[in-house]
Image (spheres, grey):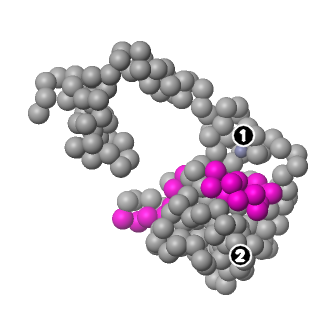
Amino acid sequence: MYEGVVQDLIDELGRLPGVGPKSAQRIAFHLLNSDSADVRRLIGALGEVLDKVKFCVICGNVSADEQCKICRDPRRDPGVLCIVEEPKDVVAIEKTREFRGRYHILGGAISPLDGIGPDELRVKELVTRLASNEVTEIILATDPNLEGEATATYLARLLKPMGLKVTRLASGLPVGGDLEYADELTLGRAFEGRRLLDV
Ligand SMILES: [Zn+2]
């Protein structure tokens, strides 16, 4: 639609989550009309993310170092592992201050329609991590939607035979929703009221 580099920019922006073609066009023209110093700051931030952000080798969370702050913190209980889909879920749970254990980030949820199975998630890393026998309880904190429930069921079936206590966050979370959108109180209560999974 537009010539050369402008269209390239619109195409790239349009690949971002939640940005449709119209928004991509709006953002592109906003950038074109912006102060060049502002645009350079954005470019700088993108470059920094690319260079400096790593993923924790233990839990898979975004981290400034090889191991993230939570994995390095000796005050966190190594016996309880909370399994979440994305790093943003860790942020949501940390805000509740209800959880003092550690995390494992899957990197998504099982979704056959999107071609995402257990092999596309950090399940193998989880099993390896559990081999040290330090963990006794697993809290499945995947999203309360179809994919999240399927993932929780899959993991419960995988982990229970290993002799682990497997719990799921209590209901009260908005069904079909996303963990990060639950308010702190609801999410906190869901933690306290977590229940054992029968699979
Ligand atoms: Zn970590």
> Mark 1, mark 2: which one is toward the viewer?
2
Quarter of the image with the C terminus is: bottom right
Please state which of residues 197 and 22 is positioned toward the viewer in this rendering: 22
* Residue 96 part of the magenta-drawn span: yes
Please state which of residues 100 and 108 is positioned toward the viewer in this rendering: 100
What x and y, as percent, mark residue 58? 71, 45
Q: Which residue lies most toward the top here?
A: 37
Mark identifier at residue 116: none
Is disc 1 placed on a helix, strand or loop?
loop
What x and y, as percent, mark residue 173? 57, 73
| Amino acid bearing label 2 | Arg
Report the span colored magenta.
Answer: 90-113
Measured along the vertical axis of the image, is residue 50 above or below residue 199? Answer: above
Looking at the image, residue 46 sits to the left or right of residue 138; the answer is: left
Looking at the image, residue 82 sits to the left or right of residue 120; the answer is: right
Asked if the beta carbon under badge 1 is closer than 8 A to the nearest atom of ligand 1, the reply is yes
Is disc 2 placed on a helix, strand or loop?
loop
Judged from the image, the quadrant occupied by ligand 1 is top right
Residue at screen point 71% across, 33% down: 66
- The image quadrant that residue 15 belongs to is top left
In this view of the protein, can residue 58 be seen by the observer? Answer: yes
What x and y, as percent, mark residue 39? 39, 21
Q: Which residue lies most toward the right here?
A: 75
Spatial CA distance of label 1 from label 2 is 26 Å
**Mark 2 highlights which residue?**
194
